[in-house]
Image: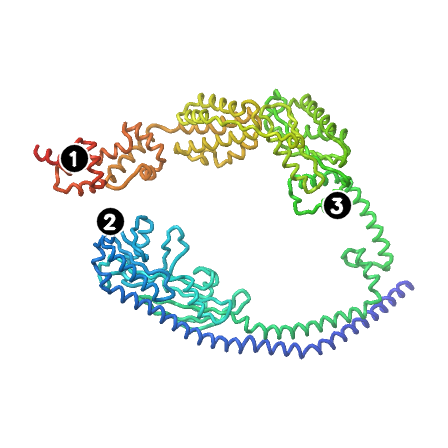
């Protein structure tokens, strides 16, 4: 009971002391709050004035300015319209232009060019004033120089200008079909002026940059944007980068729709900025435009807002200072013990216990010491895996951002001795898995690599003081050796390589390629040394023999690489056998191709590149045959699969089973009835369209096949070439028209799809006489 009473008295004493400290802090904070109230009131009043009255006054002024500038722009556009209408009714642009030969009458063409140049210079916004004269034979374009339009794409662009129900109108069009995003604001007037059947058009293309400068006059403040658009949405111009369907423009449209009037002004909050928006109408020819000017007023109100915020900030800083002084006054004595408790508890809450702080400190110290011992033990166990992970990242180049000092420090923390050392990287590659007589099979690469890595680690530990092996799990491994900088290590490397090769040959029954990089003294160069060794391994002889490639000796001897000849003739024979469905011949030619590619010490990388090239040629042949490779190979990346195979027999088997066999099966599944049905469709298409400009390509597109397959199948089914069959159809129809109608010869030529001069030649070549002579003989009979 006595102890409990003492405990209660002690708690009450602590509570009294705590209340006294809290009262002190509260009093100090209250005084500073009272001192901060005037500043808060002043900041609120200034902020209210800035956000209310000042913004309203700016909106009124902005609206007046924009309306005046809009009238100026409207006057400029009206002048352009009046000028173009004046010239459209000029006698220079009457019906005589439709039949005039400007090559002979070059003076007329020169006069038109001068007139267009005068019109172009009449206004600074004019980018180009042009004249388009349409026609079925050869349209003419003055831009402002005379030119014949030979491109159908360009002709379609200008011809579309004539197909309007309006005589004068504004449009926005991309006159360069290769750059459809580059559109010019254009004023068009059909000529002759007032005609019901116009044959041409005068057009003024405005300079987008000058139009932007004109629109910028409607933006009184920096950072704003002005735009105008047709009510039907066809025209759009802007001083900024916002497109017609951008979120900013959509927000402007919503604000205008909410106001419910054709012109007016409003505020718009957008991405933390306040904009004054003024909008109205331009009455243009047969259409209405809406102009919108949005200007940020944040730059004007910002200083006042900043001052009000500063007043708020000073007041709030006073409150923070009050809290800080109260905390310092009540905690200054306790601060050393509190800092120690904070460090030991590591941010945890203070436990509700009867022990004092020093008992808690002692207990926490013992806990931390025990945890440190356990972590050290775990680190010792995991260190080999951590070192392997670090080395794997280093070799693959993932640590390129680290400096030499950082990498040096990390390797020292991993218990490597790296001072006064050089580094050598070995790339070990196994080959010959297909010749293991059933011990291993394709797909066991991980198991074989694991066994080989264990052998590499055991032998490296015997020959070198510091080494680490990396398992790549694909019949390849990497080995990092840390050697004394000035010591000779060539003999040790030679002995290690020979013993490792012998062990792999004896135990795993496989062949070994060892590529040794040149030594480097910088850790940052280790990834380069690894890539060098890996590249050197790809330069091994393609034959499955033991090989050791020392890059240091290669650099010293200056050895080059002999280029192998690619067997193009075998490639052509192989592809021809595939396309004709001769499977056995194709397999024999594929075997001969691989032997020719790997003849007399060919490098593995050359053989691999040659087979990849052959795969590309085969895929091209498959596409020409009317078969999509993506469907045939089920969207598999064939190049990636082939590049992962290193064994000659596996390459041959993969090519036969994954490439040749599916293609041959697809060819065999095609029936003769399907081919005949396609050719019948082609013949019907020719009979219905012989009078048009048709070709093998568009006929193939119509029936859904490729031109090569159509040409080949057409000859097989009909016994005639595609062009001979089409010529026969046209000649039969021409003879019928010559016998039974009074059409002129050039009209007959046009009826059967020929030009007059070419029709005479082809008819005489086919019938042995001219069309006129044929008509005379047929009428005489």
Calculate the distance from the C-alpha at mark 2 to the C-alpha at mark 3.
Answer: 81 Å
Q: Residue furthest right?
A: 2
Q: Residue at x 65, y 36 (%)?
A: 530
Q: Quadrant of residue 216?
A: bottom left
Q: Secondary structure at mark 2?
A: loop
Query: 480 left or right of 248?
Result: right
Q: Residue at x 55, y 66 (%)?
A: 272
Q: Quadrant of residue 491?
A: top right
Name the spot of residue 618 as percent of width and height, x first.
45, 30
Residue at the disc numbered 2: 137
Name the spot of residue 398 as percent of width and height, x first.
65, 43
Q: Secondary structure at mark 3?
A: helix
Q: Residues within 10 Å of mark 2 (few under 14, many from 20)?
A: few
Name the spot of residue 611 as percent of width and height, x first.
51, 29
Of the two numbered discs 2 and 3 in the rendering, the one whose residue sits closer to the viewer: 2
Q: Which mark identifies residue 409? A: 3
Instruction: Check the picture and name the quadrant holding the C terminus.
Output: top left
Query: 694 left or right of 504?
Result: left
Q: Quadrant of residue 780?
A: top left
Calculate the distance from the C-alpha at mark 3 to the C-alpha at mark 1.
Answer: 95 Å
Calculate the distance from the C-alpha at mark 2 to the C-alpha at mark 1.
Answer: 26 Å
Q: Earlier in the sequence, mark 2 or mark 3?
A: 2
Callout 3 touching callout 1 (CB < 8 Å) = no
Residue 428 in view, yes or no: no
Q: Which mark identifies residue 158? A: none
Q: Residues within 10 Å of mark 3 (few under 14, many from 20)?
A: few
Which of the two residues, 559 or 362, is positioned nearer the viewer here?
559
Residue at the disc numbered 1: 770
- Above or below, 160 against 623 in this view is below
Which of the two residues, 736 or 666, is positioned nearer the viewer here?
736
Name the spot of residue 725 as percent of width and height, x first.
25, 32
Instruction: Check the picture and name the quadrant holding the N terminus.
Output: bottom right
């Amino acid at each position: 009971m006595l102890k409990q009473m003492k405990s209660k008295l002690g708690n009450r004493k602590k509570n009294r002391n705590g209340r006294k400290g809290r009262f002190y802090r509260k009093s100090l904070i209250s005084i500073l709050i009272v001192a901060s109230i005037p500043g808060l009131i002043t900041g609120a009043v200034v902020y209210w004035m800035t956000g209310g009255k000042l913004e309203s006054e700016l909106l009124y002024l902005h609206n007046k300015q924009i309306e005046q500038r809009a009238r100026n722009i409207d006057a400029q556009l009206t002048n352009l319209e009046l000028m173009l209408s004046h010239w459209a009714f000029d006698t220079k642009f009457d019906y005589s232009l439709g039949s005039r030969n400007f090559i002979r009458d070059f003076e007329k063409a020169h006069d038109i060019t001068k007139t267009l140049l005068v019109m172009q210079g009449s206004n600074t916004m004019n980018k180009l004033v042009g004249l388009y004269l349409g026609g079925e034979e050869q349209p003419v374009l003055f831009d402002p120089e005379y030119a014949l339009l030979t491109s159908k794409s360009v002709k379609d662009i200008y011809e579309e200008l004539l197909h309007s129900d309006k005589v004068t109108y504004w449009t926005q069009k991309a006159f360069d079909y290769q750059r459809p995003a580059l559109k010019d604001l254009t004023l068009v007037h059909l000529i002759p002026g007032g005609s019901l059947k116009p044959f041409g058009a005068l057009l003024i293309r405005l300079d987008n940059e000058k139009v932007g400068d004109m629109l910028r006059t409607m933006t009184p403040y920096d950072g704003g944007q002005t735009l105008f658009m047709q009510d039907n949405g066809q025209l759009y111009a802007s001083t900024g980068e916002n497109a017609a369907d951008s979120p900013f423009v959509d927000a402007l449209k919503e604000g205008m729709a909410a106001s419910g009037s054709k012109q007016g002004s409003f505020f718009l909050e957008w991405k933390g900025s306040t904009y004054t928006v003024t909008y109205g109408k331009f009455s243009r020819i047969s259409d209405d435009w809406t102009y919108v000017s949005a200007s940020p007023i944040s730059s004007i109100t910002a200083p006042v807002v900043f001052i009000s915020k500063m007043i708020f900030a000073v007041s709030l800083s006073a409150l923070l200072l009050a809290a800080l002084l109260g905390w310092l006054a009540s905690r200054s004595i306790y601060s050393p013990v509190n800092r120690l408790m904070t460090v030991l508890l590591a941010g945890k809450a203070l436990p509700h216990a009867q022990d004092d702080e020093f008992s808690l400190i002692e207990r926490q110290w013992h806990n931390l010491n025990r945890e440190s011992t356990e972590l050290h033990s775990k680190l010792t166990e995991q260190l080999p895996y951590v070192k392997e992970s670090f080395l794997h990242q280093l070799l693959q180049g993932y640590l390129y951002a680290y400096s030499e000092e950082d990498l040096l420090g990390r390797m020292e923390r991993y218990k490597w001795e790296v001072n006064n050392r050089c580094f050598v990287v070995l790339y070990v590659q196994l080959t010959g898995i297909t010749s293991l007589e059933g011990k291993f099979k394709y797909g066991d690469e991980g198991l074989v690599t694991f066994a080989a890595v264990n052998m590499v680690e055991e032998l490296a530990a015997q020959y070198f003081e510091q080494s680490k092996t990396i398992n790549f799990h694909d019949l390849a491994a990497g080995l990092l050796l840390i050697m004394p900088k000035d010591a000779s290590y060539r003999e040790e490397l030679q002995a290690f390589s020979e013993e490792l090769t012998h062990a792999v040959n004896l135990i795993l029954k496989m062949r070994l390629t060892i590529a040794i990089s040149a030594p480097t003294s910088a850790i940052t160069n280790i990834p380069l040394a690894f890539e060098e060794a890996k590249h050197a391994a790809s330069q091994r002889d393609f034959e499955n023999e033991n090989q050791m490639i020392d890059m240091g000796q290669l650099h010293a001897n200056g050895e080059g690489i002999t280029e192998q000849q690619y067997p193009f003739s075998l490639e052509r024979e192989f592809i021809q056998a595939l396309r004709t469905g001769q499977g056995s011949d194709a397999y024999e030619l594929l075997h001969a191709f691989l032997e020719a590619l790997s003849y007399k010490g060919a490098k593995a990388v050359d053989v691999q590149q040659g087979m990849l090239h052959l795969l590309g040629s085969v895929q091209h042949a498959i596409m020409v045959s009317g078969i999509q490779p993506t469907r045939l190979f089920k969207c598999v990346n064939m190049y990636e699969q082939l590049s992962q195979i290193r064994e000659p027999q596996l390459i041959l088997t993969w090519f036969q089973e994954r490439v040749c066999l599916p293609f041959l099966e697809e060819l065999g599944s095609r029936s003769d009835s399907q081919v005949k049905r396609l050719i019948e469709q082609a013949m019907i298409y020719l009979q219905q369209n012989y009078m048009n400009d048709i070709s093998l390509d568009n006929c193939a597109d119509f029936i859904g096949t490729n031109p090569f397959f159509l040409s080949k199948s057409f000859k097989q089914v009909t016994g005639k070439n595609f062009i001979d069959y089409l010529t026969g159809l046209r000649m039969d129809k021409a003879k019928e028209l010559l016998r039974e109608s009074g059409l002129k010869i050039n009209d007959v030529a046009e009826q059967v799809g020929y030009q007059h001069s070419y029709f005479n030649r082809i008819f005489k070549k086919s019938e042995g006489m001219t069309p006129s002579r044929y008509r005379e003989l047929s009428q005489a009979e």
